[in-house]
Image: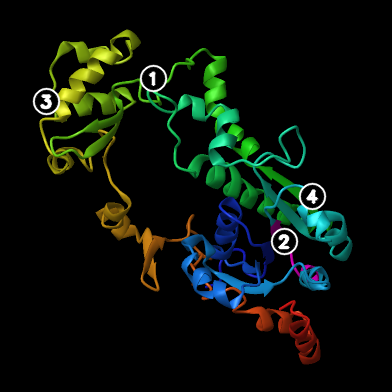
Amino acid sequence: MAGPLHGIRVVEMAGLGPGPFCGMMLADMGADVICIERKPSAAQSDFDKMKRTVTDRGRRSVALDMKKEGAAGLVLRLVETADVLIEGFRPGVMERLGLGPDICLARNPRLVYGRMTGWGQQGPLSHTAGHDINYIAISGALGAMGYADRPPTPPLHLVGDMGGGGMMLALGIVCALLEAKTSGQGQVIDAAISDGTASLASMYYGMRAREQWSRQRADNLLDGGAHFYGCYECADGRHIAIGAIEPQFYRLLLELCQIDDPAFADQWNKQAWPELREKLRRIFLRRSQDEWRALLEGTDACFAPVLDFDQALEHPHHRARNTFIDIDGIAQPAPAPRFSRTPGSAGRLPESAGQHTREVLAEAGFSPAELADLAAAGII
């Protein structure tokens, strides 16, 4: 069964992090994603195979030497029949390559041109280097994460690159594709990770406006300040996560843990949270993670074990839902979200850069003679 984006063709300029993640999401949903990669030298071929990651799955790979005259024209030929172009370079790079939005949209007025950057296409920082940690820092999100007595804790690069970046670009692309169905016109998407992360933090800005969020880390409901929402160490050194916010779930947690200390009755007394957290810390140290799982997992106490990536693969819930799949010996997350009628599917990783170059170009109308000329010129 074809995915919900079956029939959509995407030209993706190879990049790092959020761009490939966006491309993976579109490919998982059935889009034909053609990744334009740098043409490797013979010495790079083994490295090229090693650097492949799960987020490269589902692509067809075209390898070009973009420094060669005629390479940009080749990409424009592909753009003519594409629905989407994705690029993740600093502002101005695509323009210098001769592949800026104006040129591409002139060739294909219905094209959705997705631009993925950290700081956006305009602004004082737009031309400076950065990484996930920098983009989430100025959004306010990073400053709210971690312990009160230590520097903020970076949350992997899920919040910025993947959530505020790749997923926001994927949403923008689908929205622009829907709009183009009625207008017949494409448009440019300026997906800045700093913008996207700020958007993800919308609820916290709302709480701040209502004076329900303090500027102190580990002092709030959802940042580890509340004793009933956080992680605790167990007797075996492993950890568990507790999220018993609602009163009925909180009462059940106390009941199942046989906690009858009257101090716990006043759940929302913020002044008591530090003392109650310390009491819970001592309680959870009495048993191993497996013992707490046997008591609490599967109840409404809002409990979960804290697992590493290897352990997550084996969790019964994930196994029942096939949350993870195996492709060519690599365990990886299955496509998400799920569709009842047009489910997505995960494709394989390209074996090497340029594996599908001739196949894709032939589909685009390049003749055998043209392909021979491109090869002779060193473009492909």
Q: Residues within 10 Å of mark 3 (few under 14, many from 20)?
A: few
- Earlier in the chain: of badge 3 and badge 4, it is 4
Q: Residues within 10 Å of mark 2 (few under 14, many from 20)?
A: many
Circle 4: element type: loop
The answer to whether marks 3 and 4 mark residues whose Cβ atoms lie closer than 8 Å is no
Cα–Cα span, label 1 and label 4:
41 Å
Image vertical order of residue 112 relative to residue 2, above or below: above
Q: Which residue is mark 1?
A: 148
Q: Nearer the viewer, residue 132 or 294?
A: 132
Looking at the rendering, which quadrant does residue 84 occupy? bottom right
The answer to whether marks 3 and 2 mark residues whose Cβ atoms lie closer than 8 Å is no
On the question of residue 347 being in view, the answer is no
- Earlier in the chain: of badge 2 and badge 4, it is 2
Q: Which residue is mark 3?
A: 258
Q: Position of residue 354 (x, y in %)?
A: 62, 76
Looking at the rendering, which quadrant does residue 210 occupy? top right
The answer to whether marks 3 and 1 mark residues whose Cβ atoms lie closer than 8 Å is no
Residue 84, which numbered label? 2
**Extent of the magenta region:** 79-86
Q: Which residue is mark 4?
A: 92
Cα–Cα span, label 2 and label 4:
19 Å
Q: Position of residue 54 (x, y in %)?
A: 47, 62
83 magenta-colored: yes
User: What's the residue at 11%, 25% (across, down)?
Assistant: 258
Q: Name the kind of residue labelled 4 in the image.
A: Gly
Q: Name the kind of residue labelled 1 in the image.
A: Ala
177 magenta-colored: no
Q: Position of residue 196 (x, y in %)?
A: 62, 38
